[in-house]
Image: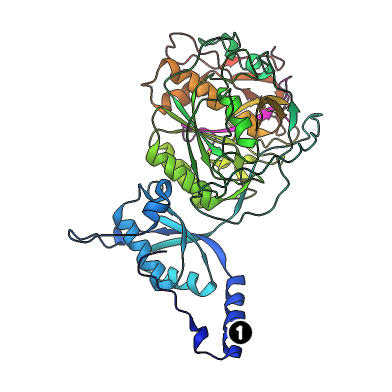
Amino acid sequence: MYEGITLLSPFKTLPLATVLGAILASGAAVAQTKDYIVVLSDAKMAPVQAKETIRDDRFALLGDAWGYLPQKLVKEVLRLEKRHAMQVKQTYSQVMTGFSASLTPVQAAALRQEPTVAWLEEDQPIKVQLLDFLFGGRRAPTPPPAAAPAPQPAPISIVLPSQPSAPQQAVPESTQQTVSYGIANIGANNSWALVGDGSGSVDGPTVYVIDTGISDHRDLNVVRRVNFAGGVMTDCNGHGTHVAGIVGARDNAVDSVGVAPGVRLVSVKALGCEGVGTVANAIKAVDWVTANAIQPAVANLSFSLPGVSRALELAVLRSAATGVLYTIAAGNDGIDACRTSPANQGGGANPAVFTVGAVNRSNQEASTSNFGRCVDLWAPGVDIPSSRNGGGLTEMSGTSMATPHVSGAAALYWGIKPQAPATEVGNYLRSTRATGSNRSKDGDALRLLRAEVAPTQGAPAAETSAAGTLN
């Protein structure tokens, strides 16, 4: 498929025993491969000469993934692929210069010696931050399998680790709008949009939901979809659709309503049908958003790692530096969020990056929500009704559900001040936090999200105080 690569068949001339031996040896080598993120030094890469043409089939086949890459990077990727007999999976140019690939120990060692290679990091799995037990949350029955969707062209095919599908509590198609308790608890119903009154919409910002995709749903204003996880373009899990509904389900007479009703949503698929993906895919999603975001822009990351990734942290920080505001799930392991990536980038060091913990309807911290100084805000995340894959509503719980409340609040601010920089929005959200009477696991007071954005929002007010049981 790729120019400059020729596949030869030795089976016409070699003895059968030799062929079988080669196959077994090849299988052993494949079994030893690991996935890596390879970061390149841009300054050491050879420039593209004036008369030089860089051609590769992936520009046509994987337009979203390859179309924005600079020729200089593609030239270096093709050189390294040929020299080290490997095939690149994802390629990055905005938040870092580099790529991901499956490598044998020999290939990894050889790449480390390349003058253009700065460092390597072993890839890791990521997963959605969804729970079915949180403060008495119900275990939802798994819905019956839907008919298989028609095959669609996929930008890349990646085998993802197998995990149980996300549970969904199905709610029938409605002719009356459901307003989550979260809308009132954060004060969005008192904002300029009067969320929940059955009219009005948020125009101006765009929210990029980096998740399992977003399905077709009558209540969601999805303006674009891209896919870096393989498989079908739309959501085959349900998590991303639910998150999108919390952000921006329309304020109308059906289903649910989001914090920023009707806001433009872009589905950036980085996790597969089991709600699992890789750091490499997540970085590609962040890289694409950085290159293509229509600002003002929010990127919602309702996933996290069990550990840390230098590469993913770097990607989020560099993307935020371009003006995209990031909201990140704190995680559901009941531990210090500073121990996990990219949640550890919250805490105020970067005003455009938020890490979000979860509370219930009484503004008590969810028992499994991560906590600590890296958490900027706590938002409703227990038994939240929102858009269901295939239509109607479903309830889910987790810091995944808390995070889009913050994304919606940022979109509300940008809805009346579209020229405001992301740092101003971030400072507003921090300055209006409500200090709750309830305490986190470490004994600190919870800092609760408020979204009472006034019709003519002025300078951020001083941080307010509130009881831990808002209506």
Write down the quadrant of residue 388 in the picture.
top right
- Which of the two residues, 208 or 226, is positioned nearer the viewer here? 226
Image height check: is 431 above or below 31?
Answer: above
Q: What secondary structure predominates along the stretch shown in magenta? A: loop
On screen, 382 above or below 155? above
Residue at the spot of label 1: 20
Tell me the quadrant of the picture where the N terminus can be found: bottom left
Q: Secondary structure at mark 1?
A: helix
The image position of residue 356, as x and y in percent, is 60, 32
Mark 1 belongs to which amino acid?
A: Leu
Residue depicted at x 59% and y 88%: 16
- Outermost residue, left direction? 50
57 is within the stretch colored magenta:
no
Image: magenta residue range:
346-366
Vertical order, 52 against 96 (above or below): below
Residue found 48% across the figure and 44% down from its top: 285
Left or right of 155: which side holds 273?
Answer: right
Residue 47 appears in the rendering: yes
Q: Front-most of 21 and 74?
A: 21
Q: Residues within 10 Å of mark 1 (few under 14, many from 20)?
A: few
- Spot occupied by residue 17 in the image (x, y as percentages of width and height): 61, 90
Q: Is residue 425 left or right of residue 409?
A: left
Q: Position of residue 346 (x, y in %)?
A: 54, 36
* Residue 372 appears in view: no
Q: Nearer the viewer, residue 357 or 73?
A: 73
Quadrant location of the C terminus in the rendered image = top right
Residue drawn at point x = 42 percent, y = 45 percent: 64
Percent of width and height locating residue 189 = 59, 11
